[in-house]
DNA sequence: GTCAATAGTTTGTCCTGACATTAGGATGTT
DNA sequence: AACATCCTAATGTCAGGACAAACTATTGAC
């Protein structure tokens, strides 16, 4: 008996069965119970052991294959991919990233206004003429060291924003609590040289390297919710991601 | 009758039915037959119209939702997402990107060797001590203007590489033709300042901004195939991607 | 007129069953 | 011993049905 897969299925739980399987296998891989390169039992047996149907088992494995943790080969079997896997780039904010890493980010709100959107912002957020947006600039620090300078525009017909809450938590957390279900975001990552405005705020010198990121986020109803221009100190931040071939 | 969805299913074709549906709906969206924001008929009716079962229809729509073209809401229906969608970041090479955009890239091979891998490369590619790799540096130009400086290490037990073919086509094209099926890649994007070695090659000045990218690619058997450090002129290149929430 | 209960529509989840396709080993033949 | 053929095991595809959950709109009561 190769693997035991220490996982139980709770049929009274509101979380779908296939998702319980996903979580269980993910945990088994992370704890090392399933070693990289090891082969899983076949779908039918695994399903039988957990008292699940094969489609349910398959749906779980589908997700794991898509996320790059498993590799399937017809006629052969399913293997755990050879470790070294980083978590894929997710639709999260910098604040989430840092919180999950144990650091304690702080935020200074440098400016905050509720103003009429200009042409470029109206285009980016697909707003009609005369629409108003929240416009603010924040400085994100970790351990007292400045890391990111962020300028954002958010449409005002979803949830109210104020300076105090922006200083206390991340923008995405506020929007999610306001009922926004993010669906996708398009972003562009590049580089630039720190100018005289950015350098002192980031406690670096003009001419040092910055990573730039422009992002526009869309919710599940197709509305453009937020757009922003962010710059990061290149010596403290980079974007890490896993690309999965389909 | 809202939409007609001009598509036919060929049951004698070797391409899976659900994939035929995916392609059909993608085409309908691209040709404008399905407008952004429009609602599709419900899954059951669509399946019936095409003489398919609901699971098959659903699997097709699952893929379209995952790729960000459709949005589903329980109790409501399925909508075409509000355009403005960029193609997601794919596991392609810079050469592919530029070729697809109509530009004509050229490549200068600055150095090429077949050497024993040092410790860092052995770690990155998970190779045993004493293993040899191809190690080369290339300068990619578009329209005569230099754009990227790329240093790569490739394991040598998959396919043979030589200087001439690297000058004629992209690395990923060569590897794919050599039988490599890429499965995933992890990469990190950051920024740096051009140094005295990079600046003249990229025809810029020391101190200008560069985008950096480090990537390691894995094939479908879990082998680390290739790793590389690339730098791009920040005024000519940026990474654009679409993130899809799961 | 306003609010709450209800019915209907649509997607979400899960089941059982069947056959096709592929990879790889076992078998048998030359 | 080398080769071609068959068989088995595993994933890939597809069908049809059933019930659950969520959202909308209507209906009804106050």
Image: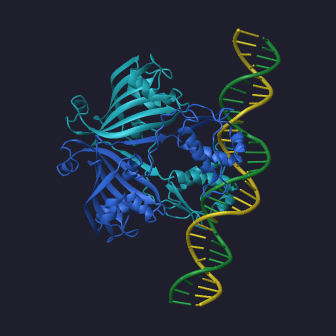
Chain colours: A blue, B cyan, C green, D yellow
A44 lies above or below B81: above
> In this view of the protein, which residue sits in the foreground, A204 or A195?
A204
B66 lies above or below A226: above
Residue B227 located left or right of residue B8: left
Residue C8 located left or right of residue B26: right
Determine if residue A148 is in view: yes
Residue A17 located left or right of residue B144: right
Looking at the picture, how far across and down is residue A41, in whole percent? 67, 36
* Residue visible at 59% across and 42% down in the picture: A25
- The quadrant in which residue B207 appears is top left
* Residue visible at 56% across and 42% down in the picture: A27
> In this view of the protein, which residue sits in the foreground, B58 or A19?
A19
> In this view of the protein, which residue sits in the foreground, A240 or B146?
A240
Looking at the picture, how far across and down is residue C10, in whole percent? 62, 65
- The quadrant in which residue D5 appears is top right
> In this view of the protein, which residue sits in the foreground, A198 or B231?
A198
* Residue visible at 41% across and 20% down in the picture: B117
Looking at the picture, how far across and down is residue B67, in whole percent? 51, 50
Determine if residue B26 is in view: no
Looking at the picture, how far across and down is residue B54, in whole percent? 68, 56
């Amino acid at each position: 008996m190769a693997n035991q897969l220490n996982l139980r299925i709770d049929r009274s739980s509101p979380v779908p069965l296939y998702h319980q399987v996903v979580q269980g296998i993910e945990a088994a891989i992370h704890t090392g119970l399933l070693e990289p390169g090891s082969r899983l039992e076949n779908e039918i047996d695994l399903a039988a052991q957990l008292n699940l149907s094969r489609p349910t088992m398959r749906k779980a494995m589908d997700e794991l294959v898509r996320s790059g943790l498993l590799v399937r080969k017809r006629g052969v079997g399913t293997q755990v991919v050879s470790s070294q896997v980083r978590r894929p780039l997710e639709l999260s904010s910098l604040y989430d990233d840092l919180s999950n890493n144990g650091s304690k980010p702080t935020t200074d709100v440098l400016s905050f206004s509720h103003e009429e959107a200009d042409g470029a912002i109206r285009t980016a957020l697909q707003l009609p003429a005369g629409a108003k947006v929240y416009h603010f600039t924040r400085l994100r620090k970790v351990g007292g060291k400045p890391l990111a300078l962020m300028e954002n525009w958010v449409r005002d017909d979803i949830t109210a924003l104020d300076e105090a809450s922006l200083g206390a938590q991340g923008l995405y957390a506020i929007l999610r609590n306001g009922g926004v279900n993010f669906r996708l975001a398009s972003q562009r990552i590049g580089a630039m040289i720190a100018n005289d405005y950015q350098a002192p705020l980031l406690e670096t010198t003009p001419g040092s390297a910055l990573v730039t990121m422009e992002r526009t986020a869309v919710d599940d109803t197709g509305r453009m919710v937020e757009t922003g221009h962010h710059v990061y100190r290149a010596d403290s931040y980079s974007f890490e991601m896993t690309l999965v071939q389909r």
